[in-house]
Image (cartoon, rainbow, N blue to C red):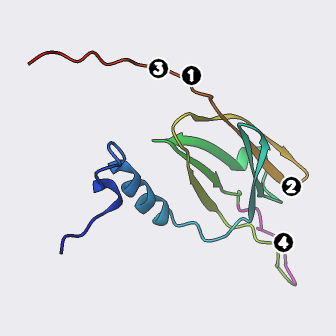
C-alpha cells in the first residue's frame, strides 16, 4: 500500500509545500511563554498580542523570515546588586514564531500596558477569470 501524503494528493496540485509548512510549524519550539492571543480584528485583519511585561521596546525584535513572523525578547541582565527575596516575574528570553500565509503582511506593532500588539493584514486577491485556448493537435 502506498502512503498518500497531503502534498501528493492528485487534486491538490501545487500544495506540496503545505506539508513542509506544517512540519516547520510543529518544530518551531513554541513553549507557551510568553502567553499570547490571536484575534480577528476585521474582515481581513488579525492581531497577535503577547504579554511582555518587563520588556522594553529595545528588548524586543520582530522580523519576518521566509514567511515566518518571529518575535524575540531578551532583557538586559540588571540584577547586579539586587537581592531578591522572591523572584516570580519571568524575565527570560523568548522566541515565538508564527507562519504567515501568502498575502498576509505585518501592518504594524506597538506596545501598551505590558502587551505587544502586532497587526496583520491579508490582501484581498483580485478575482481573475482566465480563458485557456485549446489548440488542435
Between 85 and 61, the one lying in front of the other is 61
- How far apart marks 4 and 1 lie (CA) works out to 59 Å
Q: Which residues are magenta?
A: 77-85
Residue that extends furthest to the right in the rendered view of this protein: 113
Task: Tell me the SS state at disc 1.
Answer: loop
User: Horizontal and vertical percent for residue 96?
Assistant: 61, 58
Reading the chain from its start, which is encountered first: label 4 or label 1?
A: 4
Q: Quadrant of residue 80?
A: bottom right
Q: Which residue is mark 1?
A: 126
Residue 123 percent across, percent down from the top left: 62, 29
Query: Is residue 55 left or right of 101 when viewed as pictured?
Result: right
What residue is disc 4 on?
82
- The span from disc 2 to disc 3 (Cα, nearest Å) is 47 Å
Q: Secondary structure at mark 4?
A: loop
| Residue 108: % across, % down | 73, 34
Mark 4 or mark 2, earlier in chain: 4
Amino acid at each position: 500500500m502506498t502512503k498518500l501524503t497531503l502534498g501528493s494528493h492528485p487534486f491538490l496540485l501545487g500544495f506540496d509545500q503545505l506539508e513542509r509548512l506544517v512540519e516547520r510549524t510543529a518544530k518551531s519550539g513554541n513553549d507557551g511563554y510568553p502567553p499570547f492571543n490571536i484575534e480577528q480584528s476585521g474582515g481581513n485583519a488579525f492581531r497577535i498580542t503577547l504579554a511582555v511585561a518587563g520588556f522594553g521596546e529595545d528588548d524586543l525584535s520582530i522580523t519576518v523570515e521566509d514567511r515566518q513572523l518571529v518575535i524575540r525578547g531578551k532583557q538586559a541582565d540588571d540584577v547586579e546588586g539586587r537581592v531578591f527575596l522572591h523572584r516570580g516575574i519571568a524575565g527570560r528570553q523568548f522566541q515565538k514564531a508564527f507562519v504567515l500565509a501568502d498575502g498576509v503582511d505585518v501592518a504594524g506593532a506597538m506596545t501598551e500596558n505590558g502587551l505587544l500588539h502586532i497587526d496583520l493584514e491579508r490582501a484581498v486577491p483580485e478575482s481573475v477569470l482566465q480563458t485557456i485556448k485549446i489548440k488542435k493537435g
